[in-house]
């Protein structure tokens, strides 16, 4: 699953295409239909006792079923009589098996479902096959587009201990199939939360499927939640790139927030295309943070993401480099002004931001800390950047704690930073 960032026009994020293959294969086809082993093991148990009425109804149908080519229309017309002639549980189990097997061969899913339901309702399904039979019943109902009927069968399959083909994921899929994405995401989210709480590994397909459904249906809160889960549980270029891109496209953020989000993308090495680099350059602004603009343009050059012949990029880098030289020359004076007892919040933040952009996080940290105690500060922005300064020093545990304090619209950005800090802290400990 690859999310990409498109160009921004007039400050508004445009949409981007999301292509994702359904991990389960989508609508369950006949080739995927799993026939239960009705005649698997012959257990030492009482011999079935079929009623005379059932035998009389069954025998002519058996002849039709075994005569090639099979006249399925005639065969199917006799199913109702076979059901009516079933007087006991053995009759019903055998009738259900016969109906299921013959209807499934013809891909007649609604009729095959009736047969499977008869077997389950008879109580004669061997205990070790209950989960499998319920799963097949769920498949048949799903194929017949009876999604509400499919759900309890998939759930019963999982409850019986059946794990092949991931029946619980099909419960969520049944909601998605009937255009109830929020219900499917809620159900899937509850499963994921339970697994995480139990310390169990979550299937990657669950996370990717939930992320795709949330994003494609514009359920932004869920998209960000699943993106964070995906990056947390399966860290890598793909998951982190998706997490950054999804939040960038759904957050409705302005340049200050975009800057801090793309800073994470740069540190995670998941800025995937030139548009992201140019957006980073735009958000940093060569007039405000020229040193960072030079760094990101040079990084784009090194990765082949930016064109060295692009006049906009070359001119921006030239002006940013000139301003960086002046800023370095004036840095001692700015630090002195920011340290003064009567320093304004703007002066303190200018020192902190400039130092962070210059790659001096240890010097930036105390100014962000000072800014937090001053009136007029955007506390959520300052808290975020304090965490970034701590992260850049390798103080990952402190950074994580700082990011977790961020509230409001910036919280999803800080949450991703916290996850990434935790992962770096874990890597450092290994």
Image (cartoon, rainbow, N blue to C red):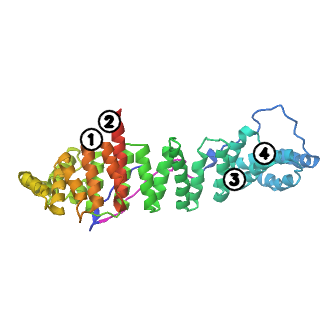
| Residue behind mark 2 | 428
Please say whether residue 224 is one of the residues in the magenta stretch.
no
Q: Is residue 13 visible?
A: yes
Q: Which residue is mark 1?
A: 394
Q: Earlier in the sequence, mark 1 or mark 4?
A: 4
Residue density around tag 1, few if under 14, some if 14–19, many if 20 or more, within 10 Å: some
According to the image, label 3 marks what residue? Answer: 109
Which image quadrant: the C terminus?
A: top left
How far separated are the C-alphas under marks 2 and 3? 55 Å
Alpha-carbon span between mark 2 and mark 1: 9 Å
- Evaluate if marks 2 and 1 touch, with contact meaning CB atoms under 8 Å apart: yes
Q: What's the residue at 44%, 57% (across, down)?
A: 223
| Among the 4 quarters of the image, the one containing residue 354 | bottom left
Q: Name which of mark 3 and mark 1 comes first in the sequence.
A: 3
What's the magenta region? Answer: 12-26
Q: Is residue 21 magenta?
A: yes
Residue at left offset 16%, top offset 63%: 344
Cβ–Cβ under 8 Å for marks 4 and 2: no
Of tags 2 and 3, the one toward the viewer is 2
Q: Which residue is mark 4?
A: 97
- In the image, 420 versus 185, the foreground residue is 420
Distance from the alpha carbon under mark 1 to that under mark 4? 64 Å
Q: Earlier in the sequence, mark 4 or mark 2?
A: 4
């Amino acid at each position: 699953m690859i999310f990409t960032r498109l160009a921004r026009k007039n400050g508004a994020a445009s949409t981007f295409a999301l292509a994702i293959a359904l991990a389960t294969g989508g609508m369950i086809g006949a080739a995927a239909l799993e026939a239960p082993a009705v005649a698997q093991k012959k257990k030492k148990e009482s011999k079935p006792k079929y009623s005379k009425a059932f035998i009389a109804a069954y025998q002519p149908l058996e002849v039709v079923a075994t005569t090639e080519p099979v006249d399925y229309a005639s065969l199917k017309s006799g199913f109702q009589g076979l059901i009516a002639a079933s007087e006991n549980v053995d009759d019903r189990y055998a009738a259900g098996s016969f109906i299921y097997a013959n209807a499934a061969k013809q891909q007649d899913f609604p009729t095959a479902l009736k047969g499977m339901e008869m077997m389950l309702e008879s109580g004669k399904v061997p205990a070790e096959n209950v989960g499998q039979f319920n799963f097949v019943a769920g498949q048949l109902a799903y194929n017949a587009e009876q999604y509400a009927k499919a759900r309890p069968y998939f759930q019963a399959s999982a409850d019986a201990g059946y794990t092949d083909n991931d029946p619980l994921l099909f419960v969520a899929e049944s909601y998605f199939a009937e255009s109830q994405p929020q219900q499917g995401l809620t159900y899937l989210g509850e499963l994921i939360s339970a697994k995480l709480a139990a310390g169990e590994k979550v299937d990657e397909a669950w996370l990717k499927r939930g992320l795709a459904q949330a994003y494609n249906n514009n359920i932004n809160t869920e998209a960000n939640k699943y993106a964070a889960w995906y990056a947390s549980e399966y860290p890598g270029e793909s998951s982190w790139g998706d997490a950054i891109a999804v939040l960038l496209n759904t957050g409705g953020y302005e340049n200050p927030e975009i800057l801090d989000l793309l800073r994470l993308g740069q540190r995670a090495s998941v800025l995937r295309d030139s548009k992201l680099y140019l957006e980073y350059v735009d958000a940093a602004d060569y007039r405000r943070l020229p040193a960072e603009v030079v760094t990101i343009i040079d990084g784009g050059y090194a990765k082949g993401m930016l064109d060295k012949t692009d006049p906009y990029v070359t001119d921006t880098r030239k002006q940013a480099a000139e301003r960086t030289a002046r800023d370095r020359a004036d840095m001692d004076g700015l630090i002195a002004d920011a340290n003064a007892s009567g320093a304004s919040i703007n002066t303190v933040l200018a020192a902190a931001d400039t130092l962070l952009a210059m790659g001096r996080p240890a010097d930036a940290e105390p100014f962000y800390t000072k800014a937090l105690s001053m009136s007029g500060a955007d506390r959520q922005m300052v808290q975020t950047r304090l965490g970034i300064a701590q992260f850049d020093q390798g103080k990952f545990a402190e950074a994580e704690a700082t990011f977790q304090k961020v509230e409001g619209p910036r919280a999803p950005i800080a949450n991703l930073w916290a996850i990434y800090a935790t992962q770096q802290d874990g890597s450092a400990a290994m």
